[in-house]
Image (tube, rainbow, N blue to C red):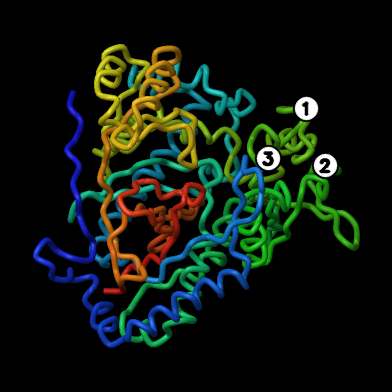
Amino acid sequence: MTASEPSNFDEMHAPDGSVRQAYRGYQRWLEQQEDGWMKRKDFEAESFFRRTGITFNVYGENDAEERLIPFDMVPRIISGGEWRRLSKGIEQRVRALNAFMHDLYHRQEIIRSGRLPERLFRNNAAWLPQMVGFTPPGGVYTHITGIDLVRTGPDEFMVLEDNARTPSGVSYMLENRETMMAMFPELFSTVKVRDVSDYPRRLAKSLAACAPQGAGPKPSIAVLTPGIFNSAYYEHAFLADQMGAELVEGSDLRVVNGKVQMRTTVGFRPVDVLYRRVDDEYLDPLSFNPDSVLGVPGIMDVYRAGNITIANAPGTGVADDKAIYSFMPEIVEFYTGEEAILPNVETWRCADPDSLKYVLDNLADLVVKEVHGSGGYGMLIGPTASKKDIATFRKKLENNPDNYIAQPTLSLSTCPIFTKKGLAPRHVDLRPFVLCSPDGVDITPGGLTRVALKKGSLVVNSSQGGGTKDSWVLDD
């Protein structure tokens, strides 16, 4: 086993300095602008975000203050041809994930076949016995999925992570586009970019298509939020407003006559589809954490009776597991009969003794992640880590190898950001948002581009100093 050699692919400029085809329209427009004007626009964008209130909270911070999402006004541009190839791979993966969830809670054919070790979910807290033998309305488990992609070459896109539980960030995708169109309206008449503004309408349509039988022609949709102190509350409120859905907390809901109903000014009204942004553990105190005040007592009984749709389905967090991720090529092939179009990043499962030995011998060159980790926390980036950090992680691996996977240090592709000294390359990733319903798979063109604003940094998470930029898919 050997770690992959990192590459350094710049999405705007070829090695000889020429501008790549996808960026040429933007470059021609940019050359017509004055530096001073662009600097004023950069300040204008920050003011816009501050007025709009596009913020997030960071858990564990002493000051617990809301932070402004850093926004870069240079778009990340993907050609129409590149997007068509990406879309095929994304759709294949999401269909496989949904089939995997159904199998895992029913016959477990993939376990019987020996393609997936049973231990991976038997001791997995995200696997819910309450879901065994139950099929959600419409047969859909992963209603909204975020597939994190990284690029390392002209035609080399890889999946870094699957987000099948409660993927966040779509509101920033929409606000980034709105900001760009407000600041540079003439640019969008010069460069033809596919629209993303109808995502809330498409989300509402997709969720309505997943409503349980008997919901009627206009299913009632609500967004369940943990409340204003949640780090993604802005997004919960934004999406509810844009969809024309009700924004509710657990205290607004109760089970009445075998249905989940929400409090309104004219009494309680049934909810057909609940887009929940509350973790499984807190969803129903009668089925999960008895101390939870965020969920609805008895909602799982209503769910299993087929009287409400919960999106995403409880128990889908199994697919977010990084050890499960390492088996995704086998999972895709098992359920689709095809080779995975989008490859995984090479991954070593530390639960395997040979892999663990390799990882321990090469810690300084690898990225080590917790199997259940997220947000850039609980990980080691070997090439930038101190000897002390490496020694600490070595002990963690030796004491609990099942809790970790390791990957090569990829040099993510770069896109330019606007700095005081002009354009400068920074590493990026991409999270396309995928809707799944009985009517099919709907992929929003583009997604959320996260960018590591610090020179040389590979960590794009906003909680770790990263920012976002508008993602363009050219309409060609």
Quarter of the image containing the C terminus? bottom left
On screen, residue 217 above or below 276: below
Nearest to the observer: residue 425 or residue 324: 425
Q: Nearer the viewer, mark 2 or mark 3?
A: 2
Query: Which residue is disc 3 drawn over?
Result: 306
What is the count of numbered marks?
3
Q: Amino acid at mark 2?
A: Val
Coordinates of residue 155 in the picture (x, y in percent): 19, 53
Quarter of the image where one finds residue 388: top left
The first of marks 1 and 3 along the sequence is: 1
Look at 60% across and 36% down and name the residue there: 314
In the displayed structure image, the side of residue 205 where residue 101 appears, left or right:
left
Query: Which residue is disc 1 drawn over?
Result: 290
Q: Nearer the viewer, mark 1 or mark 2?
A: 1
The first of marks 2 and 3 along the sequence is: 2
Quarter of the image where one finds residue 430: bottom left
Coordinates of residue 108 in the picture (x, y in percent): 45, 23
Quarter of the image where one finds residue 340: top left
SS at mark 2 in the image: strand
In the displayed structure image, the side of residue 270 where residue 403 appears, left or right:
left
Circles 1 and 2 in contact, beta carbons < 8 Å: no
Circles 2 and 3 in contact, beta carbons < 8 Å: no
The first of marks 1 and 2 along the sequence is: 2
Coordinates of residue 396 in the picture (x, y in percent): 44, 18
Q: Amino acid at mark 1?
A: Pro
Query: Which residue is disc 2 drawn over?
Result: 255
On screen, residue 1 above or below 160: above
Quarter of the image containing the N terminus? top left
